[in-house]
Image: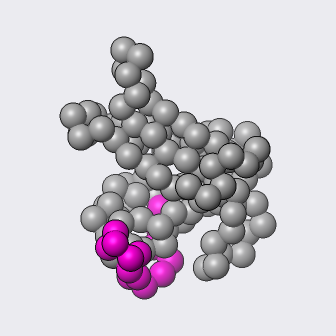
Amino acid sequence: MEGDDLESTKHIGAFLDSRCVGVLSLFETTSPYLIEKHQYQLRGMAVNPNYRGQSIGKKLVLFSETELKTLNIELLWCNARASAVGFYKKLNFEINSDEFQIPNIGPHYSMFKKLA
């Protein structure tokens, strides 16, 4: 993805028995919907289908939040697939946009969580 190689970008993985079973990336960028100065966007989150339902995604997000707090980041946001809104709501993210389409991917919502 664009920005993968920036020094500020963070790539986080979940591993079981040396096998990568989940990933996400964090990009230092601002949301057009939010005013906080210090923001990161969560992108590219995925969990291997064979390992879903084991809280791996939740653990990845919570670990990311802890890491960002150490950097004094105020807010984490994402463009969540409509089908994943419930997952993010359980982690205390809030919707802050109407539904929108990402071409070739489908319906999404902008969601955020204040970290500070």
Q: Is residue 115 visible?
A: no
Give me the residue at 48% from left, 81% from top: 97
Give me the residue at 61% from left, 58% from top: 2
Give x and y (percent) for residue 71: 76, 44
Q: Which residues are magenta?
A: 93-106
Q: Is residue 105 left or right of residue 75?
A: left
Q: Is residue 30 visible?
A: yes
Q: How many marks?
A: 0
Q: Nearer the viewer, residue 82 or 20?
A: 20
Q: Is residue 72 left or right of residue 98?
A: right
Give x and y (percent) for residue 55: 33, 37
Q: Is residue 92 left or right of residue 8?
A: left
Q: Residue 37, located in which quarter of the rendered image?
A: bottom right
Q: Nearer the viewer, residue 20 or 1?
A: 1
Give x and y (percent) for residue 43: 51, 55
Q: Is residue 41 left or right of residue 85?
A: right
Give me the residue at 46% from left, 58% from top: 92
Quadrant housing the C terminus: bottom right
Q: Nearer the viewer, residue 9 or 54?
A: 9
